[in-house]
Image (tube, rainbow, N blue to C red):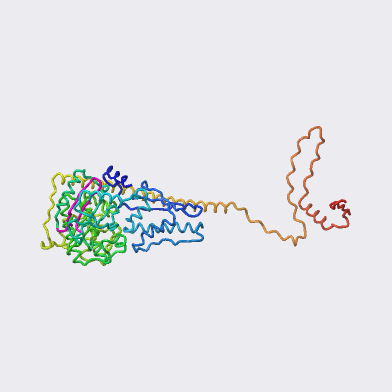
Amino acid sequence: MAAASAAVFEERRGIQLDDTIPLSCSFDEPQVEKSHITYLIRVQRGWSKDDSWGISRRYSDFVKLHSELSPSGVELPLPPKKVFGNMDRMFIAERKAALQVYLECVLREPVLACQLCVKRFLDPTNYDVAMDEEALRQVSMFFRNEPLWEVVERLPNIGWRIRRHYYVVRPRDSPKTVKHMLTLLPPGPQLFLAEKDMVSFFKTLSNLIHPQILPVQFATWNNSAALLIQPFIEHGSLRDCMNSKSKLRMPYIKKYATGGHGLSLMEIRKYGRQVLDAVKYLHDKQVPFTNFHAGNIFIDSGNVKLAGIEVAALGLPSPYRHYIITLKKIQTKEAEAVYTFGHLLYEMTFGEMLKLPCVEQIPAVCHPELKPILDSLLTSSGTKSGMPFLGALLASPVFPELPTALMDAKPQFKVGSKLKEALRGAKESAESQLQDEQKKVSQLRRINTAKEKEKALSEEERRKRAKAKKKSLVTAASTEAPPPRAKSPSRKHDTAPAAPAAPPAPAAPAPPAPPAPPAPVAAEPPPESGESRGALLSSISGFSKGGLKKTTTSDRSGPQL
């Protein structure tokens, strides 16, 4: 398994699957087996129905998934188990609808939707890979060549990227209290740097010095993954600070599913300014860094320390990539960074992540000083007008320039001319790819909207035609109905025979008979209805038993001896 995974890395140099694209699902008709029900699910990635597949799951599979998601603390509407009557047709239909609602609730929560157990449940083909074993193999190979470091412990599932792996390491000649964080991360679907440029970038990354960027003690690239060693911040990220019960070592699903509390206005202004300074500095150095959020921003001695810079070279999408694809005005890396800062500002203000691309209006409890900026970055009208530049945000009085005394080091990042040119080309390629994806998504959304309208119109037309047909049948029935029959007097009071009906037309003469048999006697015309009725009544009234002939019965049913 590990060898196969490594082969994929070497062949494409990156993971071509974008893990940030949301999944959706719909249920088909369940299959009734002898002892259980199999639910057929159609799963779709993104907006194209061509990228879809079918899976089959039993109720026990949903129970297992629910157990894996239970540490989040999110109340999910899993339908209860039923022992008797679970094969009833009505019950199967109700459970199918309830399971559909359950999966929709799971996929609406970003913290749950990014979990590996959810990905494997819905897409077992692409996620049924032993990622942990492959990561451990690569880390072991690294320490075989670097004997100065040793692994202290593994930190499983502490981040939202399912392909990023964390380990606590320390130098062999240092005290046990000295800890560092080792990060192993494979490249993504937007990798545009050549192999030599990747090696050069990670060598240069070790020399990056900035007061708001977490320093890198060691960085390397080995054609299949990047490996970095940075200081270990025990109290965790900015998001951990906003969730008072969270700790760095806790699993991601347990820390952030229920949200936290916002920061004070003074903290928001200070941290916002420091993040903008760091991001603007990187963009000026042609490093298109857009993957910043409250989870990779650390607070050390009251100041911001930005991490995750390596993602800019690895071609990994930001957590808001699937939002940005739907916003036509965001077409550059700088605009993407500004939009990402809007999400960070929203989370610092309200203590929870925004789960939509944009909102119609910012909540009224927002600080008055922050509301105009959030309006321009995250509302529907603001995103349609385009994003401001990073320099414009830095010039805003909301984020005043900080005193130089807060800077513990002067920024320094020497990027060679060849590497800078390669980074510029990679940025342009990523922007071109983003614009192409935006066009495709916009076209798919138009097609889907047109199909939905056509379906709605066809259903409405079908209802109109059925109504018109029913109305025409009723009209035709009313016009063709025979006139009402006159009420005849009761036979009980009849004293005279009814008036004779008109005699029927005379029968046509019989054809000439053959010569051998005698000609049949022509049948007399039937008597008139009045005469026949009178004869019948007279025969009934004149009936007498005495006129019947006496008979003798001969019983031969008995046995003969």
Q: In this orientation, which residue lies closer to the viewer: 403 or 474? A: 403
**529 horizontally vs 27: left or right:** right
* Residue span colored magenta: 211-231
Residue name at image x 60 percent, y 53 percent: 481
Give percent across and percent down for residue 352: 28, 63
Instruction: Indicate yes or no whether the magenta region holds residue 221.
Output: yes
* Quarter residue 372 falls in: bottom left
Total number of numbered labels?
0
Give percent across and percent down for residue 265: 20, 66
**396 horizontally vs 537: left or right:** left
Residue name at image x 43 percent, y 50 percent: 458
Q: In this orientation, which residue lies closer to the viewer: 535 or 324? A: 324
Instruction: Indicate yes or no whether the magenta region holds residue 154.
Output: no
**341 horizontally vs 547: left or right:** left
Give percent across and percent down for residue 231: 19, 58
**188 horizontally vs 398: left or right:** right
